[in-house]
Image (cartoon, grey):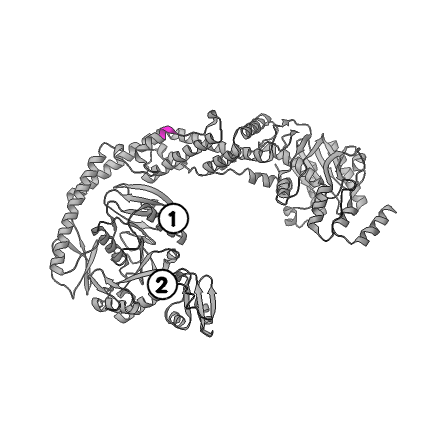
């Protein structure tokens, strides 16, 4: 849909990071859903409307808690798949399934606490929980006696046989102590030849015979113990088999739950976005772009972190329009906002605006300056622009949004202006959707397209700011600038370049001389 | 049992076949005789039927009923079933599982791969159980002990030297390294040099070229990468201290080497003298204390 340079400029890279699901379920789910394209309007609108509705319903802090609970849900997929295939499961597998149903219960509690609607409550897999319940104490797992009719007796028999073996082992150990003087602590022990060289008592087996010592183990063979262990092994395997079969019967519900969690993860990412930035249910229409009081969230967030205000902007772009206005007035941000809102609807995200009419697009292309790809191709700024413009023009249509930022600014102004006029004329002729920012005069009129401008510096709004204090100057500009996009017929477009240069600390005499030249 | 008061005991050996696992099993047996329910894990991999390096038969780890154990999921025995209580860090053999033996069983045990995870494993075993935690350690993997209050038992024996004197010297050097004292403001010298990270041979040579009137502070004894005569020289020359000392409480001796056997009583006494720690021969049932 967009290349990496465009993704960076319109905030799509930022947006994708904001929408990153918290869990593996959500990531897998996301991978199955391509960005919405023309023809997908109903699906996109449904997802956006759902996110807006949930954002209004769910408690703000509750969404964060639901997402935290989602992040904690372990992955049951491979275990469920093996159960369905009839493979044996281990106790660790059952333990992990126990964690899974516990995590689902915690997720459902978080949902309820956030005032989530009952019909949208995440699955809890009560049947699987009930199956595992006899094995679970304090969140653990033990193949409890309840899982197999033969288990209690088999365990009792083994415990008895082990006790009998221990008693016999202790009797042999006592005989070893008596005969050799060595206290056989542990499973194996050593008898030094300079301590004892005689025969060992029955039941004491030499496992290593070295010149200076013998390593000895007390071997107590017990057919009763062996039989009891074999019986218990069979009983435990039968119990696991039966338990795995019951789990397999619930595996379908488990997989449904996993899919539901994936969808919930994706939805909650959009809900969290809408709760932070606001968002509307837009009209999805193919002809043009219009939005009111829209927020370019990446910029608004960055400004907010620095304590600066962000001015929401409005725009009506029927086809091709030229945008002019003050330096630092937000022309590039206006272009980015248009691209950002279109990216939002393509990803099923409520666009952060009071209201909006937006199209689903095949592509968004940013032309202006150079990006990392261009630098990698060793292209100059001008060459990069021309190459991108050439490629974009080949595909220009109403299904592609072109955001053209000060095209040809790095070449001679007369040729650059002529080239831009011709480019805009070509875009208009192809019925393209394009917003073109520029400082060249008369482009819109010459190419016969709409003309809008940034309102610019408010009259007399710049107070006395020390040119040496850049932060204070930027704050002053931020306060003095009217970032609204207005019809260019309402007042003259200015660049405010000289006033801004002075405010940014450029030499006063140089700026004064420039003003003489400009006005003279 | 010298380590009775400790909440966790780590056995480390001065060399391979120094009798570490024998001591580990002996400590478990003694605890069992006293009715204590232990928790066990291993810094390396233990309990496999044969030594991974020399293919010699190795004693399996037999867990009495009630024993707590930390082991990777891949080593959880199928029968008799363990009660799985909790899970920990990932390891090469699967997630570390904390479990209790409900019936006596025999198994392999192994620990997690990182020092941080090993420390967390020991601490979790402490929290889960009431008895002491016993760790089959490794002298070249003692980083997990830093910052803990584990009691450390150094297993030494004929595998680390051909004579009683040599074995005692190796034990003394190992213990000296592990027992680098904590900081004491009253005793610090005119200048304090902090060595972040490992103290290696290059650091040691630089310090030896100094005036000597210096207190050298390292993070903990596991950061000392200097061995042998260089370490002895350094320790004699500077005041070597650490922020987080270890508790080395005892040595054990194994007089049995692959090809020769040392006199058991002479060995246990020599090790006690050389290290200044109580020494035990758990096989021959011998005890020596430094001043005895």
Classed neighbour count for the residue bearing mark 1: other residues with Cα under 10 Å, few (<14), some (14–19), many (≥20): some
Q: Is residue B7 above or below residue A107?
A: below
**Residue that lies at the very extreme toward the right in this rendered image:** A520
Q: Is there any visible trace of residue A221 in the rendered image? A: no
- Which residue is rendered at x = 46% and y = 74% of the image? B209
The residue identified by callout 2 is B178
Q: Position of residue A151 (x, y in %)?
A: 23, 35
Instruction: Tell me if A14 is positioned left or right of A221 in this view.
Output: right
Mark 2: give few (<14), some (14-19) or many (20+) Cα within 10 Å.
many
Q: Residue at x 37, y 58 (%)?
A: B142
Q: Could you say where residue B8 lies in the image, as x and y percent from the top left?
A: 32, 53
Q: Number of callouts in the render?
A: 2
Q: Which residue was labeled with disc 1?
A: B91
Q: Chain of mark 2?
A: B
Residue A261 placed where, x, y %?
A: 46, 32
Read off the magenta span: A124-128
Q: Quadrant of the C terminus of chain B?
A: bottom left
Q: Is residue A337 left or right of residue B283?
A: right
- Residue B24 rendering spot, x and y as whole percentages: 27, 55
Circle on res. A55: none
| Mark 2, secondary structure of its residue | helix
The one of B106 and A432 positioned closer to us in this rendering: B106
Main SS of the magenta part reads: helix
The verdict on residue A391 being magenta is no
Q: Chain of mark 1?
A: B
Q: Are marks 1 and 2 in contact (CB under 8 Å)?
A: no
Tell me the quarter of the picture where residue B25 sits. Answer: bottom left
Q: Residue at x 77, y 35 (%)?
A: A425
Q: Quadrant of residue A407?
A: top right
Q: Helix or strand or loop: what does disc 1 sit on?
A: strand
């Amino acid at each position: 849909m967009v290349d990496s340079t465009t993704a960076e400029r319109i905030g799509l890279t930022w947006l994708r990071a904001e929408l990153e699901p918290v869990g593996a379920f959500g990531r897998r789910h996301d991978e199955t859903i391509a960005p919405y394209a023309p023809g997908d309007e109903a699906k996109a609108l449904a997802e956006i409307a759902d996110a807006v509705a949930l954002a209004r319903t769910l408690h703000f802090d509750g969404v964060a808690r639901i997402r935290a609970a989602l992040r904690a849900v372990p992955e049951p997929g491979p275990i469920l798949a093996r159960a369905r295939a009839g493979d044996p499961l281990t106790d660790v597998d059952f333990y992990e399934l126990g964690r899974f149903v516990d995590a689902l219960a915690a997720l459902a509690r978080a949902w309820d606490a956030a005032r989530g609607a009952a019909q949208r409550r995440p699955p809890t897999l009560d049947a699987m929980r009930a199956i595992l319940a006899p094995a679970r104490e304090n969140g653990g797992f033990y193949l409890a006696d309840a899982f197999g009719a033969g288990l209690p007796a088999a365990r009792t028999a083994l415990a008895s046989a082990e006790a009998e073996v221990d008693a016999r082992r202790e009797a042999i150990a006592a005989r070893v102590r008596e005969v050799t003087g060595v206290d056989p602590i542990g499973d194996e022990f050593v008898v030094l030849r300079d301590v004892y060289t005689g025969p060992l008592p029955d039941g004491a087996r030499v496992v290593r015979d070295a010149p200076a010592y013998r390593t000895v183990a007390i071997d107590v063979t017990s057919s009763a113990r062996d039989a009891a262990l074999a019986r218990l092994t069979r009983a435990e395997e039968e119990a696991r088999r039966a338990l795995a079969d019951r789990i397999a019967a619930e595996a379908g519900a488990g997989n449904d739950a996993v899919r539901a969690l994936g969808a919930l993860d994706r939805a909650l990412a959009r809900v969290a976005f809408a709760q932070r930035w606001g968002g509307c249910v837009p009209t999805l229409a193919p002809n043009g772009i219009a939005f009111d009081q829209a927020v370019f969230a990446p910029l608004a967030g960055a400004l907010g972190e620095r304590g600066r205000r962000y001015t929401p902007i409005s725009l009506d772009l029927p086809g091709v329009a030229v945008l002019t206005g003050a330096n630092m007035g937000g022309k590039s941000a206006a272009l980015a906002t248009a691209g950002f809102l279109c990216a939002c609807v393509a990803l099923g995200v409520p666009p952060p605006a009071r209201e909006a009419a937006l199209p689903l697009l095949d592509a968004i292309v940013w032309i202006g300056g150079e990006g990392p790809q261009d630098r990698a191709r060793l292209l100059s700024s001008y060459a990069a622009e021309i190459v991108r413009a050439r490629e974009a023009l080949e595909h220009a249509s109403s299904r592609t949004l072109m955001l053209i930022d000060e095209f040809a600014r790095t070449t001679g102004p007369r040729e650059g202006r002529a080239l831009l006029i011709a480019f805009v004329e070509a875009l208009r002729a192809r019925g393209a959707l394009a917003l073109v920012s520029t400082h060249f005069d008369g482009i819109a009129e010459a190419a016969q397209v709409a003309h809008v401008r940034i309102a610019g510096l408010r009259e007399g709004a710049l107070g006395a700011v020390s040119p040496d204090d850049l932060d204070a100057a930027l704050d002053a500009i931020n306060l003095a600038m009217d970032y609204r996009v207005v019809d260019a017929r309402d007042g003259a477009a200015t660049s405010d370049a000289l006033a801004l240069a002075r405010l940014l600390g450029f030499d006063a005499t140089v700026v004064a001389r420039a003003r003489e030249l400009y006005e003279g | 049992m010298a380590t009775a008061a400790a909440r966790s005991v780590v056995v480390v050996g001065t060399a391979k076949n120094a009798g570490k696992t024998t001591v580990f099993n002996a400590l478990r047996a003694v605890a069992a005789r006293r009715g204590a329910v232990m928790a066990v894990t291993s810094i390396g991999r233990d309990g496999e039927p044969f030594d991974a390096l020399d293919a010699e038969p190795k004693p399996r780890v037999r867990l009495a009923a009630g024993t707590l154990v930390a082991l990777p999921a891949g080593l959880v025995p199928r029968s008799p079933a363990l009660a799985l209580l909790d899970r920990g860090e990932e390891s090469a053999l699967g997630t570390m599982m904390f479990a209790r033996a409900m019936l006596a069983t025999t198994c392999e045990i192994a620990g997690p791969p990182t020092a941080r995870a090993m420390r967390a494993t020991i601490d979790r075993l402490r929290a889960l159980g009431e008895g002491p935690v016993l760790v089959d350690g490794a002298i070249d993997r003692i980083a997990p002990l830093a910052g803990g209050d584990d009691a450390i038992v150094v297993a030494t024996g004929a595998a680390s030297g051909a004579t009683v004197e040599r074995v005692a010297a190796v034990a003394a050097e190992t213990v000296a390294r592990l027992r680098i004292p904590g900081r004491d403001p009253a005793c610090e010298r005119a200048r304090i040099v902090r060595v972040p990270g490992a103290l290696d041979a290059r650091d040691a040579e630089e310090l030896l070229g100094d005036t000597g009137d210096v207190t050298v502070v390292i993070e903990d004894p596991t950061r000392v990468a200097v061995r042998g005569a260089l370490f002895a020289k350094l320790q004699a020359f500077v005041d070597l201290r650490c922020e987080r000392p270890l508790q080395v409480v005892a040595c054990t001796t194994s007089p049995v080497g692959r090809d020769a056997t040392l006199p058991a009583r002479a060995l246990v006494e020599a090790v006690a003298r050389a290290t200044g720690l109580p020494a035990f021969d758990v096989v021959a049932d011998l005890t020596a204390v430094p001043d005895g």
